[in-house]
Amino acid sequence: MNEHTKSIASLTDRLPNQHKKLLSVYITFCVFLIAELIMDPLILKSYSRMWPLSLQFAPLMLCAMSQGCIMLVGGINLSLGASLSLATTIAAVTMFEGAGGTVGGIVATLVSGMAIGLVMGTVVTFGRLPDIIVTLAFSYIWNGAALLVLSKPGGHIPSAYSGFLQSQGVVPFAIIMILLLLVFWKIIKNTRLGINIYAIGGNAKASFESGIHVRLTKILAYIISGLFMSGAALVLVGQTGCGDPTIGNAYGTKSIAAAILGGFSFSGGIGQMKGAVLGAFIYIAIENVLFFSGFSSFYQYIIQGAILIAAIGLKVVSYYRRGGEGA
Amino acid sequence: MKDAFLQVKQVSKSFFGNKVLSNVSAELRPGEFLALIGENGAGKSTLINLITGIYSYDEGEIWINGKLCKTITPAEAQRLGIYTVRQELSINPVLTVAQNVFLGHEILNHGLVNKKEMERITRELLDAVHLKHIDPRQDAGTLTMAEKQMLEFCKAVYQNPKLLVLDEATSALDDDQVEIIFNKLRELQKQGLMVIFISHRLHELYEICNIMTVLKDGQQIVTEPIQSLDEDRLISLMTGRTIQDLFPAKRESKKVQSAPEIIKIEDGTFGKCKHIHLAVKKGEILGIGGLQGQGQQTFMECLFGIRKLEQGAMFLDGERIVLRGPSDAMARGIAYLPAERKTEGLFVSHPIAFNLTFACISRLCDFLGTIRRKAEKEEIDRAFTSFSIKAHSPNQIISELSGGNQQKVVLAKWLARNPKLLLLNEPTRGIDVGTKKEIYELMAGLAGKGVSIVMISSDTMELIGMCDRVITVYENEINYELLGNDLTEEALVKASVFRRDRNE
């Protein structure tokens, strides 16, 4: 270790452990926050710009949290986009005008989101199948199911609900929702379940030998993931005013990218929900910056891919560095 | 006399028809410390895995605390008071030190984890084993091997075990740390703690245990108070086999040793191995022995270029070389047969023919780079006859073959390149006796033709029967070198388990 890294190390040593792990995410976040502000200076001029922005960011943030949940237990969810589509169609057919109809629809969407997680989690754990295959297969199933519920964008979202989501209070509703879910996760993390989720991602065999119910824990992680996903669906339907059987497609791979940018690891056990939220912000900020910079959209895709590889590559390099020092 | 807490009665266990434990019995009463001892693969770990519920047993009975336990899970064993500290550590790298100690037994407060209390208790546990510098809140992944092992011990002791199983649980600790743990154990012994201790450090067993069970090839040889088993008798009990006519006749040691050196490492440092001197003669079979996981693998990896030589020099045929990687080593006539046949040595889902020609495919291609089918067929036929591979056809998928035949294919694959140095890692593991014999004859034939062979084996008999010279490795150092008439089973076992006195 040279002098330079030593001085950085002594600085970071003073940070609490969980923030230390997210340090690189924080730095990237700040960089893109500044970039976003330069590209879109309206944000600073008009506070009301926060509402459309929060609605742009919130769905991916929730999807990244959902993906993060599965990645913590060492899996990956390739069906997230399809299940998100399905959840929006369910929301669009179960919501009715009036307070009762709206709340009923919200509950129905959240419950079906958790059911989606339960089904996949059960197949993965009891079938002893790899997450990647099972969720890939389920992506077709959820796609089909979404088209069965609504063959084209439609259904009905109460205008009062959409209005509420976009209503200009003190703080945008989407931000409040994400903060509430972060608190919810904080509580989960401080229960036995939370520790077990991290534990089985870190070392499933040893966790089993410590008497942890590995399957149950994994299924519960899938259910929580489903809950976050249906939260994203509820934000989306509020924005578009309808259910859409293909709207989720864009979010599948983006959620993986956002989670990785937010510090989650494919090997499991590593990652924090606030990281997922920041990762999603970074991802969309990259998109926005490229959009405003005026590159043709073809170049935007290519640059986006290159940035992702760079982000993941940096992480892998730093991982091996640390591993190399330890050995 | 107090009632036995643990009674193992005539227990047997087989894996895939291979009996690894037969009719083993044991009894443990409060305050008793049992040492389990035997060579690699004698069945020590299997026995404790049966007791701790990792495996279920086929025959016999295990009674714990007066109850017959036919099938138990690790969680049930823990409820009965049986905790294990293992060699392969179960510390979870992504959790904090405190979370590791309490994993599965968290202190809860209205459903939430009481972090403060857990961290306070962990602090006390760490202080008790002189690990004051470790913070209960830091990630366990940042600890050293020894610290992890101590943490495992803390974790087990906190559960107030009735029976503590230590499976090579001191392998990474230095003498002071071992002493700290032993003192704690002695203290708990007065309260009735029982221990089953597996360790390759015999002196540790003598220091703390009061009874000893010797296992050999899955059989219980003897169980006696430890005072009545002195080291000499112990060694003869652990060994005491005769070399059957499994092995080809040996060549004269002097003649082999007078051959020129084919490869030499001078004052080499690689991985954890420091200042290693190693030379292999032309046509020599050199065995690398010692207890499992002492660094033998590292030697192979260095010779094959997987691990870079950090210091020192390597000579091939008297010429100084630097191996840039496995492909460089292969180009220089070195071949390596890995221990994990299925994952490293073969394409298991492909046909035999594909596997056979894979390593020498460029030799079978014409100038355009397409495979000359005729040459390929000749090569395959040659391999089939000279290695007597038993299969329906070369197109059979390799995973359908027996382990022995698979190994022959791997050997044939490498020998098709006509290597001058062949590195074999556990060449006969999991192979039936008949095929073993064929492989031994093949090796002897190659050595006769001047091919040098370096072989790692955990099978003592194999090393004695096949090798011209054996070095034993102990904690990443060459411990002893045995050749000629000194290469006996007793000497080899001794050379494996005792560290050589450096002042000798």
Image: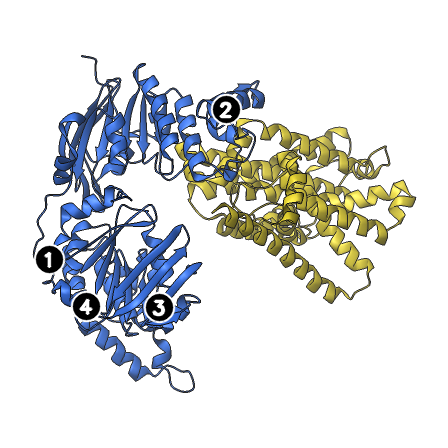
Q: Quadrant of residue A59?
A: top right
Q: Quadrant of residue B116?
A: top right
Task: Name the residue rendered at 14%, 48% in the picture.
Answer: B489
Distance (Cα) linking label 2 and label 3: 52 Å
Q: Are marks 1 and 4 on the same chain?
A: yes
Front in this rendered view, residue A115 or B276: B276
Identify which amino acid the numbered label 2 is placed on: Thr
Identify which amino acid the numbered label 1 is placed on: Leu
Distance (Cα) linking label 3 and label 1: 34 Å
**Seen in the image, is A257 located left or right of residue B500?**
right
Task: Tell me which chain appears yellow.
Answer: A
Distance (Cα) linking label 4 and label 3: 18 Å
Q: For mark 3, what is the residue?
A: B315
Which mark is drawn over residue B258?
4
Tell me the chain of label 3. B
Q: Are marks 1 and 2 on the same chain?
A: yes
Q: For mark 2, what is the residue?
A: B122
Q: Earlier in the sequence, mark 2 or mark 4?
A: 2
Few, some or many C-alpha atoms within 10 Å of disc 4 (few <14, some 14-19, many ≥20)? few
Distance (Cα) linking label 1 and label 2: 55 Å
Identify which amino acid the numbered label 4 is placed on: Ser
Distance (Cα) linking label 2 and label 4: 60 Å
Does residue B378 lie above or below B324 as drawn?
Answer: below
Residue A256, position in %: x, y? 61, 50
